[in-house]
């Protein structure tokens, strides 16, 4: 049956743009053919996402000459000259899920609930706890004004006292939060607390809310269990998106494959990469409204959706969170702060526009670095060990020790970084996404970088649920771009001090030896699929992964950008003085041929 | 070889600038209530069309804790002198308990005037609810009630000029339109606003200054319509940075609508001349903006009885862009420029950034032909 599939169409209905991708079986293998994109049509006068899908697919019809649409939607009875054999789609059109969490102890159950919610891709509007320092009426007012799409309540260990968690439930009940969308709709409430409280919770909240009971987030003090709560949130998120994005039900009828949320599609492919390379991985999907970060460390998969960081709808929030100075620090030219601010607000107001000038492009790339940096910062707060109380018995005395909750994301232990999303995939030069990713995430040691060629990871993620072979073949051959490898030791030195020597034995047997001084960035070309033996030597203040001053011998993989040697130090600190910083940025941009030479020359003369 | 980043792009629908159209406004309560008008009734700008009563603020009392009954919260009810549903005054003691043979007395007093709404045997909490508050919905625009939505609200229909802005601050208001400047290029500064502008909606050209906004708020101006505003001056005036584009609840004294964008932006001639034509008319405006999936733009509605929409003929922009279609460029380097579509080449073309995109050839009103990515123009809706 699967063998009979020759033409495949996949779409992703994003918050800003609807992207259609067309795939075809040629000989025995599946390949990507062409793309079509159009603004997502959730707003008036359209208010129907299928119109945006039609517009995007119509582009493919124009470019291929093959009819794919009729009055009923996508033609899914593939014939020799029209239609496709399989159509599937992902979506993030309905926007983020805005929810509220509540628990008994702020630093424990409320945080576990927050982690479950964030991990499920929701925006957490507030976290209420018995001990959060607010008065009860203040908490009630907060719940009332939030108008969340969903509430998650945790609290109490299994078998423990129920009075505290009942207090929280009473607070929620008193506030009577109304859903944002539509009257006569019961607000979903998930209870993930003390199992003994289920009956009184049901008696108290069952008639007013649409109540779902799942396993306790904290069955014991030492144990955190967010999986069931996440799954319940995810399920309700799907229902939320399905019922509230205009035209969504119509779209669902166009395909027999269940519609998958965009982050789920991306996450599926991130896992595929980690499994195939058998390595830890950090991935990111930089979208218009959200930044989705994925980590796979020692086989543990964590996904976070920063619902207020993005390159169009959320671009002003990036500016608000990081501050205008942090954006301007990445610009190699002079532009008044007020002018940058006005340009970014204008981008938010008109989210589907694209940069036409290089100055505008570089400005968006500056914002992208900050959005990714903040996204990873957010991710690190969730990718960490369990916070709780560890009971120890020493010399007959029972004492308690708070466990530290540092993140386990250590960039030195992340050998692979993968980027997807409109800005990264559509960057005119691959070296641009290479440097954006490595600057923002501050890759350390020896790190391979990959990116999605034309933004089709979500599409292939949903395709993999029904046709693994097609998904993998397209992914391997047309989607995954091997950008190259960055060698970046950890440490600091004075400008101009010698810090790094890399000796590469190239595939043709020639030797390439580069010595870098602090603050330098160099590139050596080594194509996709090519490997080089490398000896990386660092001075005693630097660490390439084996401890300060220790030499590393390894194999380096090439890519479309090649091998980048980065002696700018980790953490990367940009020069404070504008003129010095501008000179350094230009030097780095030129080293990677990041933008056209004429543009960089012009800027350097400013 | 990996796929190249070459994709096609469709166009963006524009903001509405209509001299005459039929405006339908749905006026809805946030919760069910009473509808005060009937289908066919004529309503004015401020007619109250629906009303409801919202439960007052709840106040939670830890009664079991206050009475020293934490171990047996269900016993609280034994010491209450009032039952659930009874009214209570502020400071009124409604539960008392004597301990240690009367040596220690503990009590529970109401923090507010209201009534006892509930008591929980599990937590020992008592909820005192304040009296109900009235919520009313006004018609916002004058016109005819064409539909009653039982218990929810009404639909009001009218003939009006409609202008959508790109961004706004503040909620619904109304006032007489006054042109405070002479051309779409002029900047509205504080000197141009006088005591006579109290209660009015004043029109600026390319920008309104921070001083002008402060003076407008002080003199009781109802609204300002401007081509542009400086983001930093707006932030200083509003008092907080704007992160996500969701506005409408700001309490800054008046409603502001920006028609073109941030920075100094000449108001489009069409918007300017339309506002000029209706100077002296009473208009409704709302700054509420939501820039997210399901975008909501701010609006100015000028009710009038001149040509109806059928008579002037509304162009359906959903049909798309073709040679001759009037457009506006909405991104640098030609931001704000107006023009007409000359051609729509099918092939992807490389622009300055080196991206290959679908472009549109535009003849600018100011003269000259330029190439612009299709994503960077919007159709002018007439």
Image (cartoon, rainbow, N blue to C red):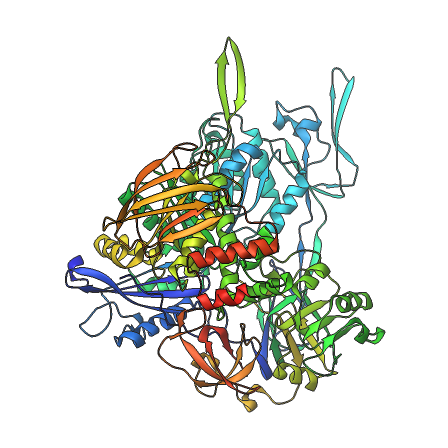
The answer to whether residue B363 is seen in the rendering is yes
Could you tell me which quadrant the C terminus of chain A lies in?
bottom right
The residue depicted at 74 percent of the width and 80 percent of the height is B181
Say which quarter of the image contains residue A333: bottom right
User: Measured along the vertical axis of the image, is residue B294 above or below residue A388?
Assistant: below
Considering every residue shown, the one lying at the far right of the view is B195
Foreground residue among A434 and A409: A434
- Give the position of the N terminus of chain A as an image quadrant: bottom left
- Relative to A92, is A107 above or below? above
Q: Is residue B288 left or right of residue A561?
A: right
Pick the front one: A262 or B82: A262
- The location of residue A376, given as percent across then percent down, is 48, 46
Q: Nearer the viewer, residue A92 or A164?
A: A92
User: In this orientation, which residue lies closer to the viewer: B151 or A448?
Assistant: A448
Whole-percent x, y for residue B139 in the image:
67, 71
Q: Residue at (53%, 68%) from the top-left corner?
A: A350
Q: Position of residue A605 (x, y in %)?
A: 55, 66
* Residue B225 image position (x, y, % from top left): 68, 74
Residue positioned 58% across, 42% down in the render: A173
Residue B328 vertical placement versus B214 (above, below): below
Q: Is residue B267 left or right of residue A349?
A: right
Q: Report whether B197 appears left or right of B157.
A: right
């Amino acid at each position: 049956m699967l063998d009979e599939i020759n033409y495949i169409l996949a779409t992703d209905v994003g918050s800003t743009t609807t992207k259609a991708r067309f795939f075809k079986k040629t000989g025995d293998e599946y390949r990507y053919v062409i793309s079509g994109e159009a603004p997502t049509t959730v707003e008036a006068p359209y208010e129907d996402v299928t119109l945006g899908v039609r517009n995007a697919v119509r582009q493919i019809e124009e470019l291929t000459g093959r009819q794919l649409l009729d009055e009923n939607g996508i033609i899914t009875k593939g014939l020799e000259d029209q239609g496709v054999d399989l159509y599937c789609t992902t979506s993030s059109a309905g926007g983020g899920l805005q929810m509220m969490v509540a628990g008994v102890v702020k630093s424990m159950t409320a945080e576990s609930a927050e982690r479950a919610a964030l991990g499920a891709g929701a925006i957490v509007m507030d976290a209420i706890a018995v001990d959060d320092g607010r008065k009860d009426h203040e908490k009630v007012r907060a719940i009332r004004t939030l108008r969340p799409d969903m509430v998650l309540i945790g609290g109490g260990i299994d078998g423990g006292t129920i009075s505290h968690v009942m207090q929280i439930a009473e607070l929620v009940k008193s506030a009577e939060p109304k859903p944002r969308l539509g009257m006569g709709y019961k607000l979903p409430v998930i209870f993930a607390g003390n199992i003994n409280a289920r009956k009184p919770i049901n008696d108290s909240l069952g008639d007013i809310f649409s109540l779902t009971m799942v396993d306790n987030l904290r069955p014991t003090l030492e144990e955190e269990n967010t999986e069931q709560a996440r799954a319940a949130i995810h399920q309700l998120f799907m229902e939320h998106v399905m019922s509230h994005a205009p035209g969504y039900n119509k779209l669902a009828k166009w395909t027999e494959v269940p519609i998958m949320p965009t982050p789920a599609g991306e996450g599926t492919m991130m896992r595929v990469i980690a499994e195939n390379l058998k390595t830890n991985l950090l991935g990111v999907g930089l979208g218009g409204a959200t930044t989705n970060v994925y980590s796979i460390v020692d086989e543990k998969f964590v996904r976070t959706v920063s619902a207020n960081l993005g390159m169009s709808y959320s671009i002003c929030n990036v500016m608000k969170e990081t501050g205008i100075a942090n954006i301007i620090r990445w610009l190699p030219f002079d532009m008044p702060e007020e002018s940058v601010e006005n340009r970014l607000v204008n981008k938010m107001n008109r989210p589907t526009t694209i940069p036409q000038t290089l100055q505008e492009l570089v400005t968006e790339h500056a914002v992208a670095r900050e959005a990714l940096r903040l996204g990873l910062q957010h991710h690190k707060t969730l990718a960490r060990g369990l916070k709780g109380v560890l009971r120890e018995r020493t010399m007959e005395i029972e004492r308690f020790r708070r466990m530290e909750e540092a993140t386990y994301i250590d960039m030195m232990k992340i050998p692979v970084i993968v980027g997807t999303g409109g800005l990264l995939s559509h960057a005119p030069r691959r070296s641009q996404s290479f440097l954006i990713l490595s600057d923002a995430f501050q890759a350390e040691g020896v790190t391979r970088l990959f990116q999605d060629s034309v933004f089709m990871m979500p599409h292939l993620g949903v395709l993999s649920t029904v046709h693994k072979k097609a998904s993998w073949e397209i992914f391997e051959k047309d989607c995954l771009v091997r950008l190259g490898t960055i060698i970046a030791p950890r440490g600091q030195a004075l400008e101009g001090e010698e810090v790094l020597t890399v000796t590469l034995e190239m595939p043709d047997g020639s030797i390439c030896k580069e010595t870098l001084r602090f603050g330098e960035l160099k590139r050596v070309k080594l194509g996709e699929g090519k490997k080089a033996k490398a000896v990386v030597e660092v001075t005693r203040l630097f660490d390439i992964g084996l401890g300060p001053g220790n030499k590393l011998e390894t194999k380096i993989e090439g890519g479309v950008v090649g091998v980048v040697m980065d002696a700018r130090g980790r953490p990367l600190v940009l020069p404070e003085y504008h003129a010095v910083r501008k000179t350094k940025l230009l030097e780095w941009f030129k080293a990677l041929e990041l933008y056209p030479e004429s543009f960089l020359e012009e800027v350097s003369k400013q | 070889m990996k796929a190249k980043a070459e994709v096609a792009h469709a166009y963006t629908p524009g903001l509405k600038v209509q001299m005459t159209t039929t405006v339908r406004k749905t006026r809805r309560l946030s919760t069910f209530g009473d509808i005060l008008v009937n289908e066919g009734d004529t309503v004015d700008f401020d007619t109250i069309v629906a009303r409801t009563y919202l439960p007052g603020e709840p106040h939670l009392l830890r009664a079991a804790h206050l009475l020293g009954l934490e171990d047996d919260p269900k016993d609280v009810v034994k010491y209450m002198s009032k039952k659930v549903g009874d009214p209570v005054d502020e400071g009124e003691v409604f539960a008392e308990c004597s301990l240690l043979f009367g040596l220690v007395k503990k009590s529970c007093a109401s923090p507010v005037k209201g009534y006892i709404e509930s008591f929980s045997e599990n937590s020992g909490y008592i909820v005192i609810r304040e009296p109900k508050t009235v919520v009313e919905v006004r018609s916002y625009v004058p016109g005819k009630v064409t539909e009653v939505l039982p218990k929810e609200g009404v639909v009001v229909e009218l003939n009006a000029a409609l202008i959508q802005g790109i961004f706004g601050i503040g909620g619904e208001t109304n006032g007489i339109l006054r042109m405070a400047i002479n051309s779409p290029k002029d900047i509205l500064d504080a000197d141009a606003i006088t005591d006579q502008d109290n209660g009015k909606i004043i029109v600026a050209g390319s920008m309104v200054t921070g001083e002008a906004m402060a003076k407008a708020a002080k003199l009781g101006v109802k609204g300002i319509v401007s081509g542009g505003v400086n983001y930093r001056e707006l932030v200083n005036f509003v008092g907080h940075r704007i992160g996500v584009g969701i506005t409408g609840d700001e309490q800054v004294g008046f409603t502001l609508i920006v028609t073109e964008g941030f920075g100094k932006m000449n108001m489009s001639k069409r918007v300017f001349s339309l506002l000029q034509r209706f100077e002296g008319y009473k208009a409704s405006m709302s700054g509420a903006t939501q820039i997210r999936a399901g975008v909501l733009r701010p609006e100015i509605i000028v009710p009038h009885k001149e040509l109806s929409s059928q008579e002037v003929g509304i162009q359906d922009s959903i049909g798309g862009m073709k040679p001759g279609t009037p457009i506006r460029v909405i991104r640098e380097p030609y931001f704000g420029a107006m023009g007409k579509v000359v051609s729509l080449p099918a092939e992807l073309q490389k622009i300055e950034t080196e991206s290959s995109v679908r472009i549109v050839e535009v003849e600018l009103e100011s003269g000259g032909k330029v190439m612009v990515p299709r994503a960077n123009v919007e159709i002018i809706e007439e």
